[in-house]
Amino acid sequence: MPNYKILILDFGEIQSDDIKFLLRKCGYEVVQRVVKDNFIEVVIKEMPHVVLINCIEENYMKLEVCRKLKENNTIKNIPIIVALNLVNSEVKKKYILAGIDDYISYPLEKEELILKIRNHGKSKQLENKLNKCEMALAENIETIKKQRNELDRNLSLASNIQDALIPKSVGDIPNCSFSWIYQPSGKVGGDIFDIFMLDDEHLGLYMIDVMGHGVASSMLAVILSETLTLNVDKGSPLKRKTYSPPYYEIVPPVEVINYLNKRFPFVKYEHYFTIFYAILNIKTGVMKYVRGGHPNPLIVKDTGNIIELDAYGTPVGFEFTEEYEEETVYLDSGDHLIIYTDGLMELEDEDGNPIESEGIIDYIHKESNSVNDYLTRGLNKLIREQPILKDDLSVLEMRWIKFV
């Protein structure tokens, strides 16, 4: 039998004792208290599952007790069952209007009393459980809100860190000018790129797209950015020490990619990435590059002709036995080099279809007929028109014009 607690408010009638003995005989926990001015405090202290009041003898005070119990916000939901003499229907109506939950007739029928006690006790027990669940849910929601706020704060900090790694300006590099777009699909993303001088004549640039997007991808992107340092004393994979002037040598692009392929294996990080890395002689326009699974960069000639840089290479991290291809191209004055991540190919056209690589080439063809210095700046408008970015998106454009 459920352990329902029953409180009998006693007005001194012998019938109250009869009810108490009957319920205790049936195994219920019964508390009997004489009604005084502090009856509300008594009920609050006991917090029973059911309150029983013997109202067989008509008494205005009993009616007021029922009414005041139902007016109290703390205990108004505790079921009140009264024992009534049903000969007088007007009295029953008064108690119903006072807010009682149920009544039993006298002389008592054991089965009827137990049935109503059980039903109302079960109802109160379920209500108590529901209240506890609601309190626990409210606490959990508050905890989740705090965790979400902390996560948002940390993501904002991570976003600021990652954004700081994206070039804001590249200074005055002879013969070269740049334009770029960087748009993560969320607060943080897996795209990273950089432009830097390896020495007085050689410029290095890379673009990396880590698989997926979000925190894990952005963390690896930041690690890669820190790994591709120019400090030879810290073991730069881009430059290494030598024992003769100028006491360093520039590492060829293919060796850089081979290093990254071994340094960041998929089995360790469970992420792979694509990369385009190039070294450009800013005076001669000779550019050596390697492409590790990255979308084909484009060279756009003054004639509007477009060349795809498609040297073979797999994404970095899988340690495939096939070797990466390092290729050399020769830039003519006025050529544009355009590098992008695959998020650009997922932009949708007016019909909602991805523009893909063919759409990018078509777009560049049209822009090459314009008088704009940069062919990719108009992409900002297309990006703003997207309902949602499905992937991180980066575009880097370099124009090489030989002045010196």
Image (cartoon, rainbow, N blue to C red):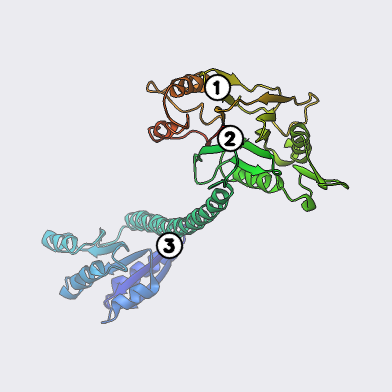
* Residue 127 in sight in this render: yes
Q: Is residue 112 left or right of residue 372?
A: left
Marking on residue 403? 2
Q: Residue at x 16, y 70 (%)?
A: 58
The one nearer the camera, 353 or 48, is: 353
User: How far apart are the alpha carbons under marks 2 and 1?
Assistant: 17 Å
Nearer the viewer's eye, disc 1 or disc 3? 1
SS state under label 1: loop
Which residue matches tag 1? 301
Q: Are marks 2 and 1 in contact (CB under 8 Å)?
A: no
Q: Secondary structure at mark 2?
A: loop
At a point 75% along the width and 24% down the height, the residue shown is: 325
Q: Residue at x 54, y 45 (%)?
A: 188
Q: Which mark is residue 314?
A: none
**Real-space Cα distance between discs 1 and 3?**
88 Å
**Which of labels 3 and 2 is toward the front?**
2
